Each structure stands twice: as structure tokens, then as C-alpha cells.
Image: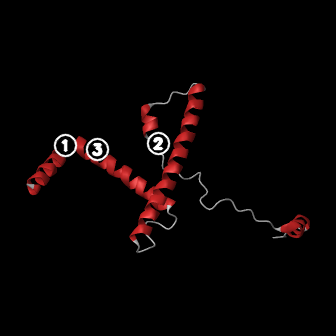
């Protein structure tokens, strides 16, 4: 029975372009989410323990952090879109469909680091003669 069902599915997959497009689109969503989880996990897709309880904790932690980031992204986008509509922008379904909650370019994973050189170094740089070349 299993082979017959698999063969029927494959025949349907080969003959229906809409089914192939739908499967590809859903696969791309899952791959995007997994890529996002790898980014959230800092070290990539590696589970660092052989203990199944610790592995489950790590997976749940990464899911929790990923969900918080996605919720924050959706909240920010919702506010931006409300402002845009108030300003008269027309937001189309096609535009909105191209967006993803997996954005991460605006997130500083490692925080903000300020280097303090001290007054002496800053004073030396300000008073040093220009380098002639």
C-alpha cells in the first residue's frame, strides 16, 4: 500500500505544476526558519551535549528566543505599516507577502562595544602633526 501511495503522489507531483510550486514554497519557509534558528543558536545547528534532557532544553531555548525575535519584528513592522498607511502609502498583498519575520540585520547579537582610549590617546591624536605622506 505504501509503495502505491508514494507512486501516486510522485505521478501527481510530476503532472501538477501548482503542487510543485506549493511544496517548494513551503520547503523554502522551513529552510528559512531553520537558518534563522542556526543564527539564533550562535554556534550553528550543533547540540553540545549527549544528554537528551539538555538537548531538549537547548532546542526549546532556541525556539523561545527565535519566537521572541520574530514577535518583536512583527510588532515593529505592524507599527511601521500603520504609520505608512496613515501617510497615504498603499500596501499591496504582493509587497507584504515578500516580508519575513526572520529579519536579523538590525539585531546586535553581541551587544554594543565602546572602546575608550582615554584622554591621553585622544589628545595625542588631536595634536599630532599630519603625516607627510
Where is residue 19 drawn, in percent x and y?
23, 43
Q: Is residue 97 above or below residue 129?
A: above
Per the image, label 3 sits on a secondary structure element best described as helix
Q: Residues within 10 Å of mark 1 (few under 14, many from 20)?
A: few
What residue is at 33 percent from the left and 48 percent from the top?
26
Residue 60 can be seen, yes or no? yes
**13 to the left or right of 96:** left
Report how far apart the C-alphas of labels 3 and 1 lie in the structure. 10 Å
Q: Quadrant of the C terminus?
A: bottom right
Where is residue 21 drawn, in percent x and y?
28, 44
Q: Residues within 10 Å of mark 2 (few under 14, many from 20)?
A: few
Q: Quadrant of the N terminus?
A: bottom left
- Name the residue nearer the viewer: 95 or 4: 4
**Residue 89 figure quarter:** top right
What residue would you read off at disc 3?
Answer: 22
Where is residue 40 drawn, in percent x and y?
51, 59
Per the image, label 1 sits on a secondary structure element best described as loop
Where is residue 2 drawn, in percent x and y?
11, 56
Q: Which numbered dot is residue 16?
A: 1
Residue 130 can be seen, yes or no? no
- Name the residue nearer the viewer: 67 or 133: 67
Q: Is residue 96 above or below residue 115?
A: above
**Residue 31 figure quarter:** bottom left
Disc on the earlier residue, 3 or 1? 1
What residue is at 14 percent from the left and 54 percent from the top?
6
> Which tag is nearer the camera, tag 3 or tag 1?
3
Per the image, label 2 sits on a secondary structure element best described as loop
What residue would you read off at disc 2?
Answer: 99
Disc on the earlier residue, 2 or 1? 1
**4 to the left or right of 27:** left
Amino acid at each position: 500500500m505504501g509503495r502505491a501511495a508514494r507512486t501516486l503522489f510522485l505521478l501527481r507531483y510530476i503532472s501538477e505544476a501548482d503542487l510543485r510550486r506549493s511544496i517548494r514554497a513551503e520547503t523554502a519557509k522551513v529552510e528559512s526558519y531553520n537558518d534563522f534558528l542556526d543564527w539564533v543558536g550562535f554556534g550553528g545547528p550543533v547540540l553540545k551535549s549527549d544528554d537528551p534532557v539538555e538537548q531538549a532544553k537547548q532546542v526549546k531555548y532556541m525556539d523561545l528566543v527565535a519566537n521572541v525575535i520574530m514577535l518583536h519584528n512583527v510588532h515593529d513592522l505592524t507599527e511601521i505599516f500603520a504609520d505608512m498607511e496613515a501617510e497615504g502609502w498603499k500596501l499591496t498583498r504582493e509587497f507584504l507577502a515578500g516580508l519575513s519575520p526572520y529579519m536579523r540585520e538590525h539585531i546586535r547579537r553581541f551587544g554594543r562595544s565602546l572602546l575608550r582610549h582615554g584622554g591621553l590617546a585622544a589628545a595625542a591624536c588631536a595634536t599630532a602633526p599630519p603625516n607627510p605622506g
